[in-house]
């Protein structure tokens, strides 16, 4: 559901002053805080309808990195198993809140739609994710984004990608339920409630959705992999 660490320029006098202050307070034996690790994440999704003719429903891939709460780059691709429409996106953002109770990530993406049905539509996409931790085993996650049109062939629409509550049954197993919905140009609001279960392993997280969709239901596999790298000290 993603950035460089902001820095400043200091005058030479301030640098010397800071160094002198450091020697006065910590001396030669003062410890230097290790740099923050870089988090690299990869996500993939695929879906399959459960009613005839049993077609694929989605293909999704995303790569992003997080450095010191900044999210960049965030790049990805999605299609809905039709040959006439697909989206590519790129952007970044920041983790605005991160504590034991809540986490809020905010991003801004540029989206380019391609394919015969896309009309070369372009969008800016504000993307928000809020995680809440109600108890050690009970949490929720909400992802919302909208499409702000940048050209005449694009139209405004918005998506509740997921709003789910999950309970951790065991260390590597979660179950939950949630809601998804979308408002697309020229159509009614689409409701897509779902049940979910997630299995975590050293190879990544495997999340399975059983979801109601227009004209039937689908099963969706969502895969997530996290790699943590520590820069040299």
Image (tube, rainbow, N blue to C red):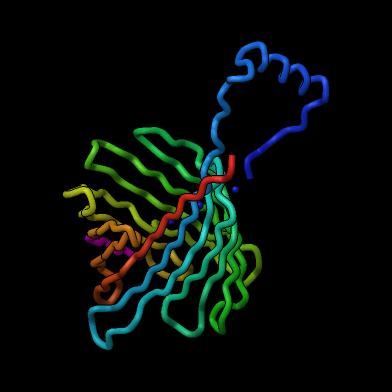
Instruction: Say whether residue 7 is left or right of residue 165.
Output: right
Q: Position of residue 190 (x, y in %)?
A: 35, 65
Look at the image and say whether residue 3 sits in the magenta stretch.
no
Which region shows up in magenta?
A: 190-196
Asked whether 207 or 11 is in front, the reply is: 11
- Where is 209 relative to 50, above or below? above
Of all residues, the one furthest to the right in this rendering is: 12
Of all residues, the one furthest to the left in this rendering is: 169
Picture quadrant where residue 33 is located: top right
Q: Position of residue 194 (x, y in %)?
A: 25, 62
Q: Is residue 180 visible?
A: no
Tell me the quarter of the image containing the C terminus.
top right
- Where is 118 relative to 200, above or below? below
Instruction: Say whether residue 129 is left or right of residue 212.
Output: right
Say which residue appears at 22% left-offset and 48% top-offset: 171
Say which residue appears at 38% left-offset and 37% top-offset: 102
Picture quadrant where residue 116 is located: bottom right
Tell me the quarter of the image containing the N terminus.
bottom left
- Where is 219 relative to 158, above or below? below
Asked whether 65 or 212 is in front, the reply is: 65
- Where is 4 relative to 182, above or below? above
Q: Is residue 204 visible?
A: yes
Prevailing SS of the magenta stretch? strand
Instruction: Say whether residue 229 is left or right of residue 123.
Output: left
Say which residue appears at 44% left-offset and 70% top-offset: 60
Asked whether 205 or 203 is in front, the reply is: 203
Q: Position of residue 46 (x, y in %)?
A: 36, 73
- Total numbered labels: 0
Q: Position of residue 108 (x, y in %)?
A: 57, 52
């Amino acid at each position: 559901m993603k950035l460089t660490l902001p820095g400043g320029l200091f005058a030479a006098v301030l640098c010397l002053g800071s160094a002198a202050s450091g020697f006065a307070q910590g001396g030669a034996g003062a410890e230097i805080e290790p740099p923050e690790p870089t988090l690299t994440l990869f996500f993939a999704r695929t879906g399959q309808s459960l009613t005839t003719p049993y077609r694929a429903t989605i293909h999704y891939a995303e790569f992003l990195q997080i450095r010191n709460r900044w999210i960049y780059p965030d790049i990805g691709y999605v299609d809905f198993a039709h040959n006439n429409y697909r989206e590519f996106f790129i952007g970044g953002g920041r983790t605005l809140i991160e504590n034991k109770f809540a986490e809020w990530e905010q991003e801004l993406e540029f989206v380019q739609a391609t394919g015969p049905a896309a009309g070369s539509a372009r969008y800016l996409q504000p993307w928000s994710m809020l995680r809440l931790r109600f108890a050690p085993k009970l949490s929720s996650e909400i992802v919302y984004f909208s499409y702000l049109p940048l050209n005449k062939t694009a139209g405004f629409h918005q998506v509740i990608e997921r709003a789910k509550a999950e309970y951790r049954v065991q260390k590597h197993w979660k179950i939950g339920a949630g809601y998804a919905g979308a408002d697309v140009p020229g159509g009614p609001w689409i409701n897509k409630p779902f049940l979910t279960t997630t299995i975590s392993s050293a190879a990544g997280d495997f999340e399975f959705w059983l979801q109601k969709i227009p004209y039937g239901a689908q099963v969706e596999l969502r895969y997530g992999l996290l790699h943590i790298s520590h820069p040299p000290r």
